[in-house]
Image (cartoon, helix red, strand yellow):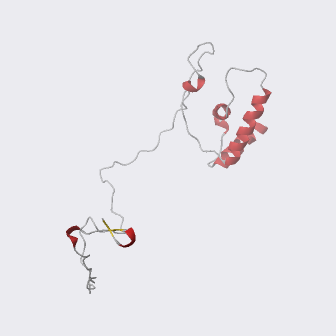
Amino acid sequence: MTAGRGGRLQRSRPGGGAAPTLTPTVESPIVGTPPVPPAADRQTTEVPDSRTPEVAESRPARPRKPAARRPEPDVDVDVGPRYLQLVRKESRLRMDQVDALAVLTRQLGRRRTQRGGERLTDNTLIRIAVDLLLDRAEQLRGNTEDELLASLKESTDR
C-alpha cells in the first residue's frame, strides 16, 4: 500500500499495472431440447420402486401375553436413589395435563405429614397413574384415547 492524496492509503496492484478491464459476455440461448445432465445431477418427481421382492408374506399377529410385573424392591434395602432404579420413558402430555399435574404435585407436597424421604414429583404421580391404569386394563374398551378414557371413567363410576 502506498500513501496517496491527503495521506490516504491506496491499494497497489501486483505488477504495478492498472486494473484490468472486464468485459461482460452473454451466453447464447439454447433452442430446442436442452442436453440431458448426467444421472447424478438430474432431479425427478418420480418415486423409484424401492420394494424388495424377497420379503416373505407377513403372518397374522399372535395375541400378546400380559407382561409380568416386576416385584417391588424391599423398602429396607438401600440400593441408592429411587430415580436410579427406574427406567427413563418419554411421554407427550397436553399442556392442560402438565399444568394440572404441577398444581397437584405442589398441593400434595404441602399436605405431606412427614418431611424427608421420597420426594413427590410429577413423575411420581405419572407412575401412580400408570400403575392404576395397568391394574384396570381389563376395563378398557375402545379404539381412541377418548373412548379408552371414557370406558375407564365409566367403570370407576359404578
Note whether 117 is above or below 130 in the view shown.
above
Note whether 6 is above or below 138 in the view shown.
below
Of residue 4 and residue 71, the one placed in the foreground of this image is 4
Note whether 157 is above or below 120 in the view shown.
below
Of residue 115 and residue 28, the one placed in the foreground of this image is 28
For the N terminus, give its image quadrant: bottom left
Image quadrant where residue 23 sits: bottom left
Residue 42: x percent and y percent?
A: 29, 68
Image quadrant where residue 92 sits: top right
Residue 122: x percent and y percent?
A: 67, 35
Let me know if residue 129 appears in the view: no
Residue at (65, 43) in percent of width and height: 141
Q: Is 102 situated left or right of 53 in this image?
A: right
Residue at (58, 41) in percent of width and height: 91
Residue at (39, 71) in percent of width and height: 6
Residue at (27, 68) in percent of width and height: 12
Let me know if residue 103 appears in the view: yes
Q: Is 105 situated left or right of 143 in this image?
A: right
For the C terminus, give its image quadrant: top right
